[in-house]
Image: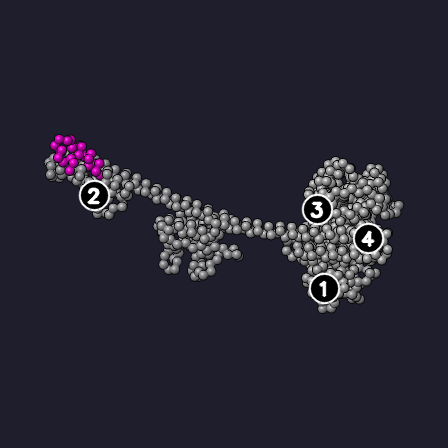
Amino acid sequence: MTETSVNILLIEDEPQIRRFVRSALEEQGWKVLEAESGQRGLIDAGTRRPDLLILDLGLPDMDGVELIRDFRAWSNAPVLILSARTDETDKIEALDAGADDYLAKPFGIGELVARVRALIRRHVRQQDPSPQTAFGDICIDFSRREVLRQGGAVHLTPIEYRLLCALVSSQGKVLTHRTLMREVWGPNHNESSHYLRIYMSRLRQKLEVDPAQPAHFLTVSGVGYRFQF
Amino acid sequence: MDTPSSLPVPLRYGLSIGACLLAMAITLPLRDKLDLANAVMLFLLAVFVVALRLGRGPAILAAFLSVALFDFFYVPPQLTFAVSDVYYLITFAVMLAVSLLTTGLVTNLQEEAERARRHEHQTRDLYELARNLTGAASLAQVEEAVATYLKPDSGKARLFLLNEGKQLDTSGCSELEKQLLNLAFNNKDAVSGEHDGAAPALYLPLAAPMCTRGVMLVQPAGAARSREHLLTMASLVAIAIERLHYVDVAQQTQLQMSAEKLRSSVLSALSHDLRTPLTSLVGQADTLAESSLMPEVLRDSARTLRDQSRAMNNLLTNLLDMARLQAGKVTLRREWQLFEDVISAGLQLLRPYLGNRPVSVELAPNLPLVEFDAVLLERVLCNLVENAAKYSHEDQRIEIRAFVEQQEACIAVCDRGTGFPEGKIEHLFDLFERGEAESAKPGVGLGLAICKAIMEAHGGRIDAANRPGGGACVILRLPLGNPPAFEDEAEHD
């Protein structure tokens, strides 16, 4: 898969929404398959092997979270959730089940395309990992554990560095508080989530141009954090 | 079987004498042919039968009478009380002793049996009461079961239960009664007392496993039901009343839960059914607005369409939030976190709406952790920033400041717009209140009311004021509380 030849499977029961999502994605040169039910979607996912899955969480015939779990059992392609629900616990459940990002309905074409592109980029990078990465005025060299800002070294504590790695390696993906705590402090951590918030704040202080209005280390209220280039 | 006491006393003594005479009548004609010992046996039998059937007194009479008759009619010299042979005195003594002993044994045994029967009767009645109470589905049925139990005494009972305030309901009682009732209730012990100055009354506390449920007044405390049995009855009644209480509680809870479930399913169905068409609307309009095939005029119309649809969605979100908040059933997911997270997340969400408008965020150094629900506070901030944008010019800066003031963590959202109309500030946060009575600006004044409801749910406040030099300022205040401890990592790299 490259960034241009992408097969996207769209599982959504509303034909009107399918229509504009499809046209917006095709405009970008991506190929779109449609499925109007969860059952149909699972079959299509199995036979057509999409590079990315866009899934409406409120399907009438099956629970979207269940579908994600089934899909994740054999595929690591990115999953983007479309959700009309406002309850954060549903989103967290979907993200913990393996979804990568979510978009609350209603959403604009620009937002949709940006999210899809970010997910595709991450997927492409994962297949071809590079020890160096850069965003804003920051350069990271993972092989040398080095972080540079405008050429000057930035000192990060071990926890800050682990947090940075977790975020950057999952760029574009929403990481729930639980996932981040596990990645940074290990599976048996007993710190509560305020530790995460404090270290996140310090990371922003060190790496963002305007920490109060961050451009890369974004908060998703009630859910977790997302890193974007 | 007739009980010894079921016949009148003179008749019983008469029968006793008759029994002795009968024994004599049988043995007297055979006096010379039979050994005297046989006559003694028959007399003893008579005493035994009397003791068995007529009770203790008549049996003692029969014992003495038998000895006298034996002496007079049988022992030579006959027809006198004189005794020729001194050995007969021993016979008399043994005869008397055996008679009295038999009497004692038999009557004791009978009394014992009688007691046991009475006891069994009481137990059966209590069992009956317990069964009736178990089936009781209302307080009236409990009272009925108690009335049935007290019937043999023609006793009456009244229940004094707890009122809503968990106090003993003594309305309509005299001062003395109230004192006695409270005494029984507070000491959890039975109290005897006069009632109405007439029949003696017993005040029994209704002590159930969880708490004392009230006091039962029983009168008259008759003889058929002993005090112990009445106490047992009171505890059975107490358990029945407690059971009824919890049945009631469970029913209420279930009712509440199903009402709650209905409300939340209606809300989420509404949310889904209204958002789905809005999503199509926003998406399609956006497609048109971004399409290069369209003339610029039409693209502009499409952009308006999209923005209006988004505004409608905001309105919908506010309405649904308000419905949840007003039901009072919003559970806050409070966590200790930093203001900067929620401010940046809110601004991120509003970015498409704010466009190029300048926004400044000023965080006081070393802001503490504050406990709040991030999603709800983000909602408050978005409403305030949107308001600020709505009521000020496109290139006027919106300022957000976070600081600590007088033990409260505060966020101020300020603009340089038209400000609030004078005299309207105190009503700003009322439902459906808006700055200008009728204006072209969208919104129905729901936003600020929701902000207030959310802040109050957090135990916080929201204030509004006009700024010197023009513009409006809304300040959110949350109590500081006790943030959890934070241990900095030990650095060894």
For mark 3, does the 10 Å Cα neighbourhood hold few (<14), some (14 to 19), or many (20 or more) residues? some
Callout 1 secondary element: loop
Residue that carries the numbered disc 4 in the rendered image: B288
Residue extending farthest to the right is: A151
Q: Residue flagged by tag 2: what amino acid is it? A: Leu
Residue that carries the numbered disc 1 in the rendered image: B434
In the image, the segment drawn in magenta is B25-47
Q: Residue at x 71, y 53 (%)?
A: B274
Q: In the picture provided, is B410 more to the left or to the right than B263?
A: right
Which quarter of the picture shows residue B110? top left
Q: Residue flagged by tag 3: what amino acid is it? A: Gly
Q: Residue flagged by tag 4: what amino acid is it? A: Leu
Query: How far, Cα to Cα, is label 4 from label 1?
Result: 34 Å
Q: Residue flagged by tag 1: what amino acid is it? A: Arg
Sequence-earlier tag: 4 or 1: 4
**Which label lies toward us, 3 or 1?**
3
Subunit bearing disc 1:
B
Which quarter of the picture shows residue B65? top left
Q: Nearer the viewer, residue B418 or B47?
A: B418
For mark 4, does the 10 Å Cα neighbourhood hold few (<14), some (14 to 19), or many (20 or more) residues? many
Do the residues at pointers 3 and 4 share their chain? no
Sequence-earlier tag: 4 or 2: 2
From this viewpoint, is residue A220 visible?
Answer: no
Q: Residue at x 71, y 55 (%)?
A: B317
Q: Residue at x 42, y 51 (%)?
A: B144
- Residue B124 locus on image (x, y percent): 39, 44
Sequence-earlier tag: 1 or 2: 2
- Residue B12 locus on image (x, y percent): 22, 45
Residue that carries the numbered disc 2 in the rendered image: B15
Say whether marks 4 and 1 touch (CB < 8 Å): no
Residue that carries the numbered disc 3 in the rendered image: A58
- Residue B238 locus on image (x, y percent): 46, 50
